[in-house]
Image (tube, rainbow, N blue to C red):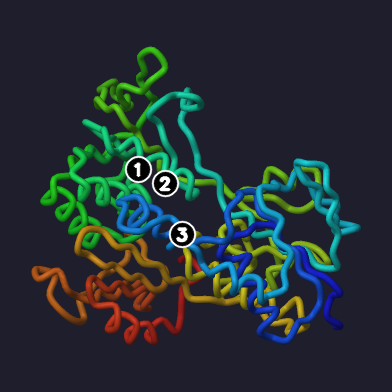
Amino acid sequence: MSAPDDVLVVGASAAGLATVETLRRKGYEGGITVLGAEPHLPYDRPPLSKQVLSGAWEPERARLRPPATLSALNVDFLLGEPATGLDVASRTVRTASGRALSADAVVVATGLRPRTLPGQAGLAGVHVLRTLDDALALRMDLMSCTRLVVVGDGVLGAEIAATACGMGVPVTLAGPQSAPLACQLGGPAAELLAELHAERGVELRLGAAVSGLVERQGRVTGVRLEGGEVLLADVVVVAFGSAPATGWLAGSGLDLDNGLVCDSRCRAAEGVYAVGDVARWHHEMLGMAVRLENRTNATEQAIAVAGNILGDDRPYTPIPYFWTDQFDAKIHVHGWPSPDAEVSIVEGDVAERRFVAVYRRDGQATAVLGWNMPKQARQHRQSLTAIPSTA
């Protein structure tokens, strides 16, 4: 298989940039264009809910690379130019301004779009947090906030709640789970995280789904729970999940099902690949389709896709890894934790909030969690030699 003459990356994201950098590192000298919907050069998203939101970092510090480093890649960045369609046969991407960009290989790296609540659009005081501009707008509102309600008890919602609480903002965290990150961490670790949030002053209103927003004269005044109770707020962050940003691919003929569906090489069609949060590919180790929403996967999958574009022809079979920093807890998770797994502490002490936990199902280690013990958790990762197909 010969290398393509040119590559078009749709999405100026971490995954998109990692694809470009890997192509160049592997010696690819063809033309590369990066199409980005936002006006910004590629930046990192994890700091948005922490350092950028708190004001500890200026926005420029979230940039993945300085402009001079990007310039050295000899890449054409077209920013502020959303993709609106793809003709698969000719591998031509249409844009909002009417451009038509063609390439021998197209890499879809468009990520996610936040889910929203009914009536959210145009309502003052209501935010999502996906982009750099989202983070800056939310920070501005938090400067005069008297009560923040975060709708969503997953990683993003819990991180926003922890950051806002650290800024001195009164915070309520609402969601349907019994504890923050219950699905991602399982019972014991999620319960410990709930305890940490409560100790630091976050009001937890968990176990009840949010049904909608309450407003007065165009500004949010509260969040309504399913049972009818209203949680008062003058700022609300909606962070209860995201969906793959595949709307622009409607009508392309590609398989769109909880992401852009790909084979084990992350290939959706001849010459069309997907990387990062938007990609749903066949994981040969698991024998099933997988889509991962984490920063580490964005880079690792991009490296694999760049190799396959250049002819490696290798399946992508990662063991997932994600981390989250909340208050003084640094939580690192390798593998596939599940709420019904058997959990054992193999190092450290839960009472001291410094430990490593191993998750097992049917006698097999499926995940490792480190709480303020990242190095030790990484060492235990090697036990994840087999992952049940039901993970």
Contact flag, marks 1 and 2 (Cβ < 8 Å): yes
Residues packed near mark 2 inside 10 Å, few (<14), some (14 to 19) or many (20 plus)? many
Residue at 82 percent across and 42 percent down: it is 98
Q: Where is 167 relative to 70, above or below?
A: above
Q: Is residue 53 left or right of residue 255?
A: left
Say which element carries label 1.
helix
| Residue at the image point whose x is 86% and y is 82% from the top | 2
> Local crowd at mark 1 within 10 Å, few (<14), some, or many (≥20)?
some
Taking the spot 50% from the left edge, 59% from the top edge, the residue there is: 293
Query: Mark 2 — residue?
Result: 135
Residue 376 numbered mark, or none:
none
Which residue is tagged 1? 139
Q: Type of residue at label 2? A: Ala
- What is the spatial separation of the Cα atoms under label 3 and label 1, in whole angstroms? 15 Å
Residue nearest the observer in this picture, 81 or 261 = 81
Q: What is the x, y in percent for residue 205?
A: 22, 37
Q: Please tell me which of labels 2 and 3 falls first in the chain.
A: 3
In the rendering, at what x and y percent does residue 70 appear? 62, 70
Q: Are marks 3 and 1 in contact (CB under 8 Å)?
A: no
Question: Total marks drawn?
Answer: 3
How far, Cα to Cα, is label 1 from label 2? 6 Å
| The N terminus - image quarter | bottom right
Residue named by callout 3: 60
